[in-house]
Image (cartoon, grey):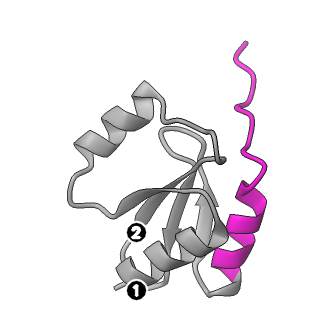
Amino acid sequence: MRRAAKRDANEAEIVKALREEGFQVLILGLPVDLLVWKPGGKFMFLEVKTDKGRSTEVQRKFFDSSVGCPRAFVRTPEEALSFARAHEI
């Protein structure tokens, strides 16, 4: 039986900041951590990393195959909000 993936320690504060800004956030897990959008806006994918976190092969392949869809690796609420604001419409 596969165990649930460990969540990054900074994920909760990133999700909270996005939701407070009016973004909808769905916590996924694989291939990336978060699906983010505002009603009527674009969907975007965010992969949360800690300061020392590195992308996995699955994540790199997903990012390579999802060209044209907004996606980013983020480490802080500020990075997540900046990216989401820039890509919300």
Q: Is residue 48 shown in magenta?
A: no
Residue drawn at x 48%, y 84% as measured from the top left: 39
Q: Which residues are magenta?
A: 1-19
| Residue ID for mark 2 | 43
| Residue ID for mark 1 | 40
The mark total stands at 2
Screen quadrant of the N terminus = top right
Q: Find the residue positioned furthest to the front.
A: 52
* Mark 2 surroundings within 10 Å by alpha-carbon count, few (fewer than 14), some (14 through 19), many (20 or more): some
Residue drawn at x 74%, y 30% as measured from the top left: 4
* Mark 1 surroundings within 10 Å by alpha-carbon count, few (fewer than 14), some (14 through 19), many (20 or more): few
Name the mark nearer the viewer: 2 or 1. Answer: 2
Q: Position of residue 49 (x, y in %)?
A: 60, 47
Q: Is residue 14 shown in magenta?
A: yes
- The image shows residue 20, relative to residue 4, as above or below, that is below
Which amino acid type corresponds to the residue marked 1 in the rendered image? Gly
Q: Secondary structure at mark 2?
A: loop
Q: Find the residue positioned furthest to the left.
A: 68
Q: Is residue 60 left or right of residue 73?
A: left
Q: Position of residue 66 (x, y in %)?
A: 27, 49
Q: Is residue 53 left or right of residue 8?
A: left
Q: Position of residue 30 (x, y in %)?
A: 53, 38
What distance separates the C-alpha of mark 2 from that of mark 1? 9 Å
Screen quadrant of the C terminus = bottom left
Q: Position of residue 35 (x, y in %)?
A: 51, 60
- The image shows residue 58, relative to residue 11, as above or below, that is above
Residue drawn at x 72%, y 45% as measured from the top left: 8
- The image quarter in which residue 27 lies: bottom right
